[in-house]
Image (cartoon, rainbow, N blue to C red):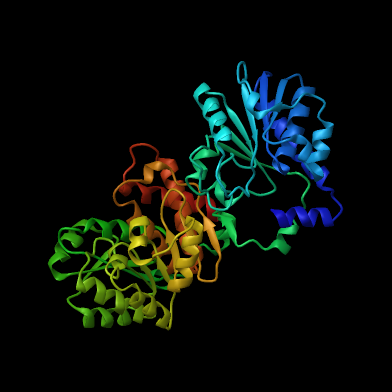
Amino acid sequence: MYQADRLAIDGGVSGATLMEAAGRGIADLILESRPVGRCLVLCGPGNNGGDGYVVARHLREAGWQVDLASLHDPAALGGDAAIMRDRWRGPITPFAAVSIDGVTLVVDALFGAGFSRYLEEDVSTLLARIKRAGIPVVAVDVPSGVNGDTGAVDTGAIPAAMTVTFFRAKPGHFLYPGRGYCGDIRIIDIGIDADYLEEIDPDTHLNDPELWQDDLPVIRPEMQKYSRGHAAIVGGGTSSTGAARLAARACLRAGAGAATVACPPSALVIYAAALEAVMVKSISDGEEFTDWLNRRRIGSLLIGPGNGVTERTRDFTALALESSADVVLDADAITVFAEEPDTLFSMIEEKMEGEVVLTPHEAEFERIFSLSGSKLQRARQAAEMSGAVVLLKGADTVIATPDGKAVINYNAPPYLATAGSGDVLAGLITGFLSGGMTAFSAAAAAAWLHGAAGNELGPGMISEDIETKIPMLLKKLLHV
């Protein structure tokens, strides 16, 4: 965002013009959404505070009663913020003298997206009073105390009803816990040309269909099932067959022409009785597994769901990575390497053909990666370390590539926190890989569709329901 501001200013748009547009845009949103009342505008020591002066002026001109309080000596402001201070004709209250009696709205213009410290006691105390009083807050750029890069939150921060940011959202708006403090996120145009994004070349995006929609598998008239790809899902034993069954059906829904569950001989009857469109193959040992993968020309392979943390899982994972198939490693196929993750990373690095996707949740991630930082930072580092595309699951799922590209998925509802949901996600990725998508696009598309299906289903959904929504969603995306 700093670079975008600089490019705009170099292109002839003054910083004061950008600040005026930001403050006026926030005031317009307030005027559109709230009845006229009494507003307390809290201004900080930097450009965020300058935005606050503009908001205060425009609200006052629109008939609001406006109180403006400055955290630091307003005379110490410099640059564009000082210009906006001078355009404000009302009184400026010292922070220690702020009253919230009769206030119906607070505009938080204390600290912006670059905040990376901690909230001082006087700020935390006032914010706590505002929270106890139940006064709605509109945050400028990010709620004060939220780090715009990481989503980290200071203990003194309070949730905003609305957060208004400029040009493009910041990672902290969509990474938890920051996302839970932002309320309704509104992004406004302040006069920065979108073409500047080409020069900035950001490597972090929100997960949106425009990133991968053109890569979705398209079924042509001359195709038959095996030309659409044959996917394999390694199934577990008799007591844990549900995970592979969920994944296999989702795999077919996502575009694989054929899907086969490769299971221990003891579980064959259970899988065969429960699956219809999905085929089942009894596999006794690793030698038979490798031979079968080669003979059936398996193009994508999922291993982990319901497999158990066993020597068989470890051996089959190694053999999968030696094959030419694209491989999705989930659940037990990740955990089985908890004691020696470098062995797993070496096998991924040595894989001659095909891509690899790791799909851990936070606990599985911690078992093989000893990393700190934000979820975005950790996913990127894990992808670089492992050589695989990493999909780090959660309400704010992050998908990252070894070369640093990343997307944040933002559409997942809480209803997806149900047993088997992750197995369906892994199956969707495997199906998209089978249809010819790259590992990154397959993972991003699967995460978005997974969230969209959860939103369509709503409360009371179970994992078996998710696959039923995939055809309708794909139909919309493919415009058929």
Q: Position of residue 408 (x, y in %)?
A: 52, 54
Q: Position of residue 463 (x, y in %)?
A: 32, 48
152 or 424, nearer to the observer:
152
* Residue in front for this viewpoint, 169 or 220: 169
**Residue shown at 73%/32% (left/top)?**
55
Q: Which residue sits furthest left?
A: 266
Q: Nearer the viewer, residue 439 or 80?
A: 80
Q: From what the image shows, is residue 373 above or below residue 111?
A: below
Residue placed farthest to the top in the image?
102
Residue 259 lies in what quarter of the image?
Answer: bottom left
In which quadrant of the rendered view does residue 237 lie?
bottom left
When asked about the image quadrant of residue 215, the answer is bottom right
How many numbered discs sit on the rendered protein?
0
Q: Position of residue 79 (x, y in %)?
A: 81, 45
Front position in the image: 196 or 450: 196
Picture residue at 62% right of the left edge, 16% below the top: 102
Q: Position of residue 390 (x, y in %)?
A: 44, 64
Is residue 395 visible to us here? yes
Residue 312 shown left or right of residue 225 in the figure? left
Q: Is residue 217 visible?
A: no
- Residue 13, relative to residue 127: is it above or below? below
Report the side of 376 relative to 192 (left or right).
Answer: left
Q: Image point 52% across, 29% down: which residue?
A: 128
Residue 29, relative to residue 405: is it above or below?
A: above
